[in-house]
């Protein structure tokens, strides 16, 4: 749980770093699940002649070799649908180990300390496995693969969720360091919602942020960074020679708009109605599969409200 001083810091500075939230066993199970997933993807690409022989390559080696070959592992490893171009067979990953991480009491206790005990798992959630910068393609701009531009998480959802209680829980699977692209924050939430521009990524309009005040947030594997939805944050580039791996999750107060209502949300904790709690990873997966079926055959629903022709974007 959090101390009163930590809760106060969260609501004034907009962020908190908490070390040692997840036990090594939870992290190891996630690493093993993703390693199996990578083995399966790699074997498929090898059978198609798209990647070199994977014999002798570990998880990181396979990630690097398949990225270099132009084979996309991001979407098959993500715990979400993409924002657009949803097809009936768009790949995603849901499994028992990542479910145990998402629903771990250590994580839910932190969310409860900040927004109360009735917790819904918000569907805005991603895996980010970031290769070292020299391995990145010149034109790589995806925030899940390369550095993340400055934004507020409130701005990543739709207006309907602007007045809600939400917290971002960013979970380090590898140590996150200044060298390998940890998060950075401009402390404070008093500026309210800042204008964003949908440019390369959806980012805060430059004139509205004093980047000189940025503070890096290194955290060890198994620790988390908590963000208030209004705190401006970004990630540093990965200048190390290893990958940087994290998951970012969001929890909302149950019953409130999630900001992305066309994606599925689930009750994660409910002292008032425990029978509503999601207990089985297969139901989590099946909820996403049902959303995929529905969205693949309906017109695209935008996930952001920002327009690139706004005057502050020029
Ligand atoms: O991991 C990153 O690069 C960015 C994460 C982020 O923006 C978030 O968790 O809200
Ligand atoms: Fe964010």
Image (cartoon, helix red, strand yellow):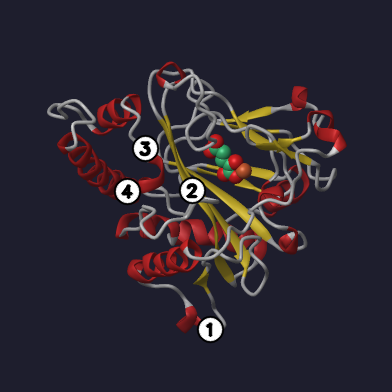
Residue 302: quarter of image: bottom right
Q: Say which of marks 4 and 3 sits in front.
A: 3
Q: Position of residue 88 (x, y in %)?
A: 39, 60
Position of 277 with respect to 152 (left or right) is left
Residue where numbered disc 1 is placed: 273
Q: Position of residue 14 (x, y in %)?
A: 72, 45
User: The residue tagged with tag 2: helix, strand or loop?
Assistant: strand
Residue 43: quarter of image: top left
Cβ atoms at labels 1 and 4 below 8 Å apart? no
Please give the name of the residue rendered at 35% of the width and 53% of the height, measured from the top-left corner. Answer: 93
Instruction: State the residue in front, 1 or 116.
Output: 116
Q: Is residue 82 visible?
A: yes
Instruction: State the residue in front, 71 or 136.
Output: 71
Please give the name of the residue rendered at 41% of the width and 45% of the height, measured from the top-left corner. Answer: 75
User: The residue tagged with tag 1: helix, strand or loop?
Assistant: loop
Residue where numbered disc 4 is placed: 30
Please give the name of the residue rendered at 51% of the width and 67% of the height, measured from the top-left corner. Answer: 264
Q: Measured along the vertical axis of the image, is residue 92 above or below residue 60?
A: below
- Name which of mark 4 and mark 3 comes first in the sequence: 4
- Name which of mark 2 and mark 3 comes first in the sequence: 3
Please give the name of the residue rendered at 75% of the width and 51% of the height, measured from the top-left corner. Answer: 11
- Name which of mark 1 and mark 4 comes first in the sequence: 4
Residue where numbered disc 3 is placed: 72
Q: Which mark is residue 27?
A: none
**Quarter of the image containing the N terminus?**
bottom right
Check mark 2 vs ligand 1: CB closer than 8 Å? yes or no: yes
Residue where numbered disc 2 is placed: 126
**Quarter of the image containing the C terminus?**
top right
Q: Measured along the vertical axis of the image, is residue 280 above or below residue 140?
A: below
Cβ atoms at labels 3 and 1 below 8 Å apart? no
User: The residue tagged with tag 4: helix, strand or loop?
Assistant: helix
- Name which of mark 1 and mark 2 comes first in the sequence: 2
């Amino acid at each position: 749980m959090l101390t009163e001083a930590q809760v106060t810091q969260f609501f004034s500075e907009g962020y908190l770093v908490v070390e040692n939230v997840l036990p090594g066993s939870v992290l190891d199970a996630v690493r093993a699940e993703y390693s199996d997933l990578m083995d399966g993807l790699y074997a498929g690409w090898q059978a198609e002649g798209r990647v070199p022989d994977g014999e002798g390559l570990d998880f990181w080696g396979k990630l690097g070799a398949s990225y270099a070959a132009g084979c996309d592992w991001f979407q098959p490893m993500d715990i979400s649908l993409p924002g657009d171009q949803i097809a009936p067979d768009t790949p995603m990953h849901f499994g028992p180990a990542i479910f145990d991480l998402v629903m771990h009491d250590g994580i839910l206790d932190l969310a409860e300390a900040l927004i109360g005990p009735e917790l819904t798992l918000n569907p805005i959630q991603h895996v980010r496995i970031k290769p070292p910068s020299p391995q990145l393609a010149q034109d790589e701009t995806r925030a899940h693969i390369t550095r993340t531009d400055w934004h507020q998480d409130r701005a990543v959802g739709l207006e309907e969720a602007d007045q809600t209680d939400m917290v971002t829980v960013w979970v380090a699977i590898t140590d996150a360091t200044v060298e390998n692209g940890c998060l950075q924050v401009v402390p404070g939430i008093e500026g309210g919602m800042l204008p964003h521009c949908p440019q390369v990524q959806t980012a805060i309009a430059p004139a509205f942020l004093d980047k000189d005040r940025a503070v890096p947030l290194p955290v060890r594997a198994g620790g988390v960074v908590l963000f208030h939805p209004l705190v401006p944050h970004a990630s540093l580039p990965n200048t190390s020679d290893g990958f940087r791996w994290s998951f970012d999750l969001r929890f909302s107060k149950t019953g409130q708009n999630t900001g992305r209502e066309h994606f599925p949300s689930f009750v994660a904790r409910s002292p008032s109605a425990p029978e509503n709690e999601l207990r089985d990873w297969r139901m989590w997966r099946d909820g996403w599969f049902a959303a995929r079926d529905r969205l693949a055959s309906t017109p695209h629903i935008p996930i952001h409200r920002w327009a690139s022709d706004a005057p502050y974007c020029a």
